[in-house]
Every structure is written in structure tokens, then in C-alpha cells.
Image: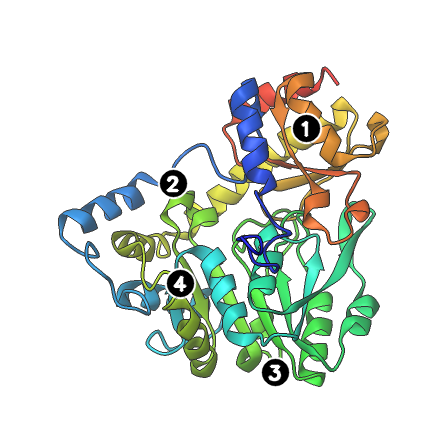
């Protein structure tokens, strides 16, 4: 071959850290607190709704391109009832193969080669790959530790905007730090977007996983933002059916049309029967969402306390089901080396933050653990980590 088979835009990415660490978990018999998926399924009644849809022949063939009407209506109702955001289910809602496809389709549709995309660093690894596939230039704005949370420097964000900036890619509640952007932070971001005529693509998949006094506020609710915001969410994190890969986008008709133009050449359609089940899931009573938060908060505290006792500095998250630690109190400074050695040292797998940064040294001492596991699994992990 005259040149390598993988194009230069993707050559830097390779195999994800999640694949590497999950393989380590299997080969060492470790407790896997690395990859973010629950180890129990979601509500039985929602699983049965999927079975019923299959048996009734609903969605077994290609569903409609924008998604089944029942799910689009349920998404629109959810946005209106939860946040006061009114969307037309026929023209302003698009169903996707999870949030990951929604992000890819939005960036492919909205970013021209050479456009700059601001992303909050550390960021979910697919953001960097999707920006690269769109031919955009990634501009990181780093969340930094301050007290017990990671904080956005609004001056740094403003300074990052140039004449080439096309959009801001947000994620709140934020993976991997667990930060939930405050009303004041979101208002400042909204004002900047309006002032500089920027689009905002916002990943809100952890919208129902917020704890203590934190509150999830969609940026589309802020003045001037509905018409310039592409809001993305999904069923996987909220209902513990990550394998179903059902996500959605809400935006103006013009933005939905743009995103759908890219999405139709990615998966075209997906998850037909599961779409009917997720439509039912979005209509579960508030007691479900409250119970989910209470359960995860207890698991967060169990793992956080155990990690602190093991010698980690712990950032107790306001949202998501990830917990960030600082390994420097353990006499360590290289998170990648630490995570590669941890399975052999004490039989636990975690993810190094450095892989979520452009400049890896900024994330070097931080390590992420997932607490969306059964209580007994977390107790086992805490016992093993005590050996550190």
C-alpha cells in the first residue's frame, strides 16, 4: 500500500481505553468499575414492553426514519413536562442509535472542515473522534478541580471563541468529572452563544442522574437558546438498557433536518421494537426517577467512602454514575500506568482521565470509577482497594 489504510483524521484514535481495560478485567478476574454500564437490567415492565412489541410485529421491520411516532411524542411530552420546552414531535424530534450517533450526526451535519468546535475537557472520547470525522478543529476548554468539584473557567471559554468557532459542545451532567453546570454557568454560556452567534450541541444523557442539591437545567431553556441548540439524550443511562441504543435529538425543524441528513446515512434506522418500549419508559411515574437517584446516590457514597479510606482524594460527583479520584495522595502521579497496574495489584479496573484530555498531563493524576453496579460488587471492590 502507498499509504496506511486508516485515514489521517482517525489515525490518532485507535482502540479505545475501554476495550483495553475491559480485556484486563476479564484476564485478571477483576471487578470492572471502568466501563460505564449497569450490571443489572432496567424495569421488568419496560423489558416486557419490548417483548410485546416484537410479538405484535411492531418495529420488526424498518421503523420510520425520524423514529416511531409513539417515541417522538413521548420525548416531546418529556421535554415539555420536565423543562417547559415545547417541541413538535413531527418536525422537532429525531430518534437515533443512542446518543453517540446523535452526536456524530450533529457534528457531521453542522461542522464544515476547518470550523472550530469548543469542547469541555475532559470529554467523552467519541467527541474528539466525531469532530475529527467532520473535519473540524477541536478547541478544549478545561474543567479544573476547585474544592470538591471540577469548575468551568468562563473567561477561558470566552477567550477560546474566535471567528472560526462554529459551535460549543456541552455535556452536563458531565462525564467523567460528575460536575453539573450551574444556572450561572449556563446563563453565561448562553449569553456568549447568542453574542457570537454560535450553535450549541448539548449531551444531556445523564439528565436524571443528579444528586443532593444539584439541578439539571437544559441550556435550551435560556433566552435565545432554543433556536440555536441541539439537545441530545438517550434511554440507556436512565433506564439501564444501554444495549438497546435508543437516543434522540430535539431542536428546531431546520436543525433537525440538518442532523437527519447525516443520520440517514449512518444507521438509517435502528432498534424498532425498543423504541416502543422506551416510549413507555419515558412515561414511568416520578417514583421511578426518584428511586433511581436514591439508589445511585447510596452507591456513590459507598464507593466514595471506600476510596477515601483506601487513600484516594475523592471528588464526590453531583451527577452521572462516575466518580473521579486523585491518586497523588497514594504517592502516584501517572493515571494510565496506575490503571494498567491496578488489576494485578488489587483486582479492580478503573479508567485514567488522561485519555479524555488533549494535553494528557492535565489529567494525569485523575482516575475514574463507575458506581452503577450492584451493591455487593461495590463492597467487593472497596474491600479489594483497601489493600492499596
Residue at the image position 75 percent from the left and 35 percent from the top:
335
Q: CA distance from mark 2 to mark 3?
A: 37 Å
Hey, which quadrant is residue 200 in on the image? bottom right
Earlier sequence position, callout 3 versus callout 4: 3
Q: CA distance from mark 1 to mark 4?
A: 34 Å
Earlier sequence position, callout 1 versus callout 2: 2
Residue to which mark 1 is pinned: 340
Residue 56: percent from the left, percent from the top? Answer: 13, 51
Earlier sequence position, callout 2 versus callout 3: 2
Hey, which quadrant is residue 138 in on the image? bottom right
Q: Residues within 10 Å of mark 4 (few under 14, many from 20)?
A: some
Q: Nearer the viewer, residue 9 or 71?
A: 9
Earlier sequence position, callout 2 versus callout 4: 2
Residue to which mark 2 is pinned: 42
Residue 91: percent from the left, percent from the top? Answer: 36, 79
Residue to which mark 3 is pinned: 224
Residue 266 marker: 4
Outermost residue, front side: 2
Residue at the image position 41 percent from the left and 67 percent from the top:
263
Disc 1, disc 2: CB below 8 Å? no
Q: Nearer the viewer, mark 1 or mark 2?
A: 1
Q: Is residue 362 above or below residue 7?
A: above
Q: CA distance from mark 1 to mark 2?
A: 31 Å
Residue at the image position 86 percent from the left and 27 percent from the top:
331
Instruction: Give the structural element (helix, strand or loop) at label 3.
Output: loop
Hey, which quadrant is residue 249 in on the image? bottom left
Q: CA distance from mark 3 to mark 4?
A: 31 Å
Check the picture and name the quadrant holding the C terminus: top right
Q: Residues within 10 Å of mark 1 (few under 14, many from 20)?
A: some
Disc 1, disc 4: CB below 8 Å? no
Residue 320: in sight, yes or no?
Answer: yes
Amino acid at each position: 500500500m502507498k499509504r496506511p489504510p486508516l485515514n489521517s483524521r482517525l489515525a490518532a484514535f485507535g482502540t479505545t481505553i475501554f476495550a483495553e481495560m475491559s480485556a484486563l478485567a476479564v484476564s485478571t478476574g477483576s471487578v470492572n468499575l471502568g466501563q460505564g454500564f449497569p450490571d443489572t437490567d432496567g424495569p421488568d415492565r419496560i423489558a416486557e414492553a419490548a417483548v410485546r412489541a416484537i410479538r405484535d410485529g411492531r418495529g420488526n421491520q424498518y421503523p420510520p426514519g425520524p423514529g416511531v411516532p409513539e417515541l417522538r411524542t413521548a420525548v416531546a411530552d418529556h421535554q415539555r413536562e420536565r423543562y417547559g420546552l415545547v417541541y413538535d414531535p413531527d418536525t422537532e424530534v429525531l430518534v437515533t442509535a443512542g446518543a453517540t450517533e446523535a452526536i456524530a450526526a450533529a457534528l457531521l451535519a453542522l461542522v464544515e472542515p476547518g470550523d472550530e468546535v469548543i469542547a469541555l475537557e475532559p470529554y467523552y472520547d467519541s467527541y474528539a473522534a466525531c469532530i475529527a470525522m467532520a473535519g473540524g478543529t477541536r478547541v478544549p476548554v478545561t474543567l479544573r478541580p476547585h474544592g470538591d468539584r471540577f469548575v468551568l473557567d468562563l473567561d477561558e471559554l470566552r477567550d477560546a471563541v474566535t471567528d472560526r468557532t462554529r459551535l460549543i459542545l456541552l455535556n452536563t451532567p458531565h462525564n467523567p468529572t460528575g460536575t453539573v453546570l450551574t444556572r450561572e454557568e449556563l446563563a453565561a454560556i448562553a449569553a456568549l452563544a447568542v453574542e457570537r452567534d454560535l450553535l450549541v450541541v448539548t449531551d444531556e444523557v445523564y439528565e436524571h442522574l443528579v444528586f443532593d442539591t444539584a439541578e439539571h437545567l437544559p441550556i435550551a431553556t435560556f433566552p435565545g437558546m432554543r433556536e440555536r441548540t441541539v439537545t441530545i439524550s438517550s434511554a440507556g443511562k436512565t433506564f439501564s438498557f444501554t444495549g438497546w441504543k435508543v437516543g434522540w435529538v430535539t431542536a428546531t425543524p431546520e436543525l433537525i433536518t440538518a442532523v437527519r441528513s447525516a443520520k440517514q446515512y449512518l444507521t438509517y434506522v435502528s432498534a424498532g421494537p425498543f423504541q416502543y418500549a422506551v416510549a413507555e419508559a419515558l412515561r414511568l411515574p416520578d417514583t421511578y426517577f426518584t428511586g433511581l437517584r436514591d439508589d445511585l446516590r447510596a452507591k456513590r457514597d459507598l464507593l466514595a467512602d471506600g476510596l477515601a479510606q483506601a487513600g484516594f482524594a475523592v471528588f464526590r460527583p453531583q451527577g452521572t454514575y462516575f466518580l473521579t479520584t486523585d491518586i497523588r495522595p497514594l504517592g502516584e502521579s501517572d493515571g494510565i500506568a496506575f490503571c494498567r497496574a491496578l488489576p494485578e495489584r488489587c483486582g479492580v479496573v478503573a479508567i485514567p482521565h488522561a485519555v479524555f484530555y488533549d494535553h494528557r498531563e492535565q489529567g494525569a493524576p485523575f482516575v475514574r470509577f463507575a458506581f452503577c453496579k450492584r451493591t455487593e460488587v461495590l463492597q467487593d471492590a472497596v474491600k479489594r482497594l483497601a489493600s492499596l
